[in-house]
Image (spheres, rainbow, N blue to C red):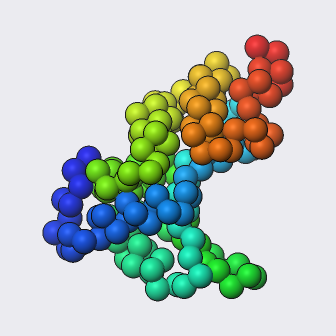
Amino acid sequence: MANNQSNPDIEDWMYPYLGGALDFTTGLRTKVRKSKSHKIGYTITPVVRFTNVSRTPLGMIDAFCDEYNINTVMHHRDSGSYFLEISGTTNVKELLESFRPYILGLTEQVDILLNRIIPALERGDHREKEGFLSVMKNVEEFREHNNRGKSSKYTKEFFEDEWDL
């Protein structure tokens, strides 16, 4: 759903609320990990994570996601905080597109996900080594905006070395 506020069952105030919640939790990630079910042995998954010490705001976000048929998983940490995780290409795309105009602080990251990474994953570019490297180039740019570029084990250079490309 490229149009925000296209779900009549959701109150108008929820869209800017979600945009602000995303901006303040900085919970956008791309998980790059080993996968036995993928031919090249690795996969890339976009993830949105909302964190809070109270379950109530996360429950509101979870209810929003239910209205859009977006799958979520709620986790409770030993520290007492909670996080709600939305993962997978379709779920993350649907979520971000639903309230994109209200995201102010993470615009670069969201745009890279929605305009480059997710379309490449939808096309299946990541299923072949050369395409995976192309997606990793965008993942690294995404990570730079997220201040996560230097701490990741899996980089484009790692895969170039791993596959002798």
Residue 112, percent from left and from top: 47, 36
In the image, residue 28 above or below residue 107: below
In the image, residue 84 above or below residue 6: below
Residue 52, percent from left and from top: 56, 76
Q: Residue at x 34, y 68 (%)?
A: 17
- Is residue 88 among what the camera can see? yes
Q: Residue at x 68, y 85 (%)?
A: 80
In the image, residue 35 above or below residue 58: above
Most distant residue in the left direction: 8
Residue 85, percent from left and from top: 55, 65
In the image, residue 18 above or below residue 142: below
Determine the image quadrant of residue 84.
Answer: bottom right
Residue nearer the viewer, 60 or 53: 53
Determine the image quadrant of residue 33.
Answer: top right
Q: Residue at x 55, y 48 (%)?
A: 46
Residue nearer the viewer, 39 or 131: 131
Q: Residue at x 19, y 59 (%)?
A: 6
Residue 137, percent from left and from top: 61, 26
Determine the image quadrant of residue 163.
Answer: top right
Left or right: residue 1 compared with residue 137:
left
- Is residue 44 among what the camera can see? no
Looking at the rendered structure, the number of numbered marks drawn on it comes to 0
Residue nearer the viewer, 79 or 59: 79
Left or right: residue 28 compared with residue 81:
left
Q: Which image quarter holds the C terminus?
A: top right
